[in-house]
Image: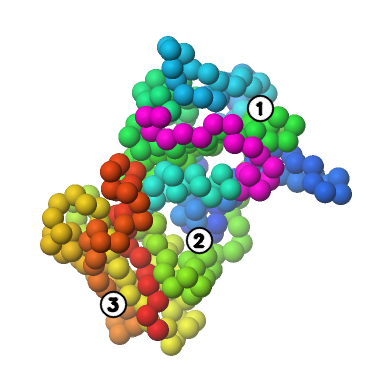
């Protein structure tokens, strides 16, 4: 029997949790379902639950074959779209840590061509587009094994101007996607207050333009709520680019995009103009090397910086 959902509801305003159908035996003998927290802006695109056999790659493609772990039982495949410029490596990293904390051991972890390129990608049993997109030059794959042999694979990539996350798991319990009661304002604002800066990863700009595309954006909601609750605070919005193009052009581009975010806060959220400024630093403060599509995507961003 197959449970099929297409164009699942898009969740905004709450942290998205993927509750794996893997039941873990905790201290004291109690059982609990493992949940994976996805970015607050994640939008569920599709989920399919089947009872069948599946092969999950556990090594790179080579010598004309794909090494894989075979699994059989209740197979759940689900995908999410993550607006913004978050790199695949950054999408997978917190999920890897959550699995590790729950007792899962990484079996295989790779990125891009080191996985085996085209052949590896098409050995993956993924949901098709438009639910999931894979850029052969920008993806990250992880396979982990948990208690009692439970298997979970995660693939993150990019496409259509956004990030995509695909989770495959083998388990007996019904997997669920739930919206937590806590709003995303807390993580964004708390990060800004504790670290002095926060990346607004859910922002999407129109292709080749400096205007925001779509919305609403949870990070801007969070900033507006935080500023309203803390009237003595001021922030700066700082635009960043990759190294494509010259310095002067990128300085202009990065500042114009920061200005677009500032205008959104002022016009759409009622933030006083005196409380938010906008600047651009081009490619002078990267957070990843610019020698790959993945790194360049990570560097194209707008950050909020605490000034008062």
Magenta range is: 98-114
Q: Residue at x 59, y 31 (%)?
A: 107
Judge the density around disc 3: few (<14), some (14-19), many (≥20) Cα neighbours within 10 Å: some
Looking at the image, residue 22 lies above or below residue 222:
above
- The location of residue 38, given as percent across then percent down, is 53, 50
Q: Nearer the viewer, mark 3 or mark 1?
A: 3
Q: Quadrant of the C terminus?
A: bottom left
The residue positioned farthest toward the top in the image shown = 64
In the rendered image, which residue does mark 1 sit on? Answer: 74
Quarter location, residue 303: bottom left
Judge the density around disc 1: few (<14), some (14-19), many (≥20) Cα neighbours within 10 Å: many
| CA separation in Å, label 2 and label 1 | 31 Å
Q: Quadrant of the N terminus?
A: top right
- The location of residue 67, given as percent across then percent down, is 53, 18
105 inside magenta stretch? yes
Q: Work out whether mark 2 precedes mark 1 in sequence or the reverse, and give the earlier one.
A: 2
In the rendered image, which residue does mark 3 sit on? Answer: 277
Q: Nearer the viewer, residue 74 or 147?
A: 147
**SS for dot 2:** loop
- The location of residue 83, given as percent across then percent down, is 39, 51
Q: Residue at x 15, y 52 (%)?
A: 245
Q: Is residue 153 left or right of residue 291?
A: right
């Amino acid at each position: 029997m197959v449970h099929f959902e297409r164009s699942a509801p898009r969740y905004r305003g709450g942290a998205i949790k993927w509750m794996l159908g893997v039941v873990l035996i905790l201290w004291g003998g109690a059982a609990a379902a493992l949940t994976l927290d996805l970015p607050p802006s994640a939008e569920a695109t599709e989920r399919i639950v089947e009872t069948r056999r599946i092969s999950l790659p556990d090594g790179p493609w080579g010598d004309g074959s794909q090494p894989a772990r075979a699994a059989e039982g209740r197979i759940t495949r689900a995908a999410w779209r993550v607006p913004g410029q978050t790199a695949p490596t950054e999408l997978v990293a917190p999920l890897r840590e959550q699995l590790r904390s729950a007792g899962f051991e990484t079996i295989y972890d790779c990125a891009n061509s080191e996985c085996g390129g085209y052949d590896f990608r098409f050995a993956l049993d993924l949901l098709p587009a438009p639910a999931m997109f894979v850029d052969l030059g920008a993806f990250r794959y992880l396979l982990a094994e948990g208690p009692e042999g439970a298997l979970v694979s995660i693939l993150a990539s990019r496409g259509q101007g956004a990030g995509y996350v695909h989770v495959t798991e083998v388990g007996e319990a019904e997997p669920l996607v739930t919206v937590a009661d806590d709003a995303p304002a807390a993580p964004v604002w708390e990060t800004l207050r504790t670290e002095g800066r926060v990346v607004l990863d859910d922002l999407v700009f129109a292709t080749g333009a400096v205007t925001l595309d779509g919305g609403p954006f949870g990070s801007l909601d969070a900033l507006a709520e935080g500023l309203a609750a803390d009237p003595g605070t001021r922030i700066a919005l700082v635009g960043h680019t990759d190294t494509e193009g010259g310095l002067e052009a990128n300085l202009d581009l990065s500042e114009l995009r920061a200005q677009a975010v500032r205008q959104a806060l002022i016009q759409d959220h009622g933030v006083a103009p005196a409380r938010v400024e906008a600047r651009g630093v081009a490619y002078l403060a990267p957070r990843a090397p610019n020698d790959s599509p993945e790194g360049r995507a990570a560097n194209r961003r707008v950050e909020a910086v605490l000034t008062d």
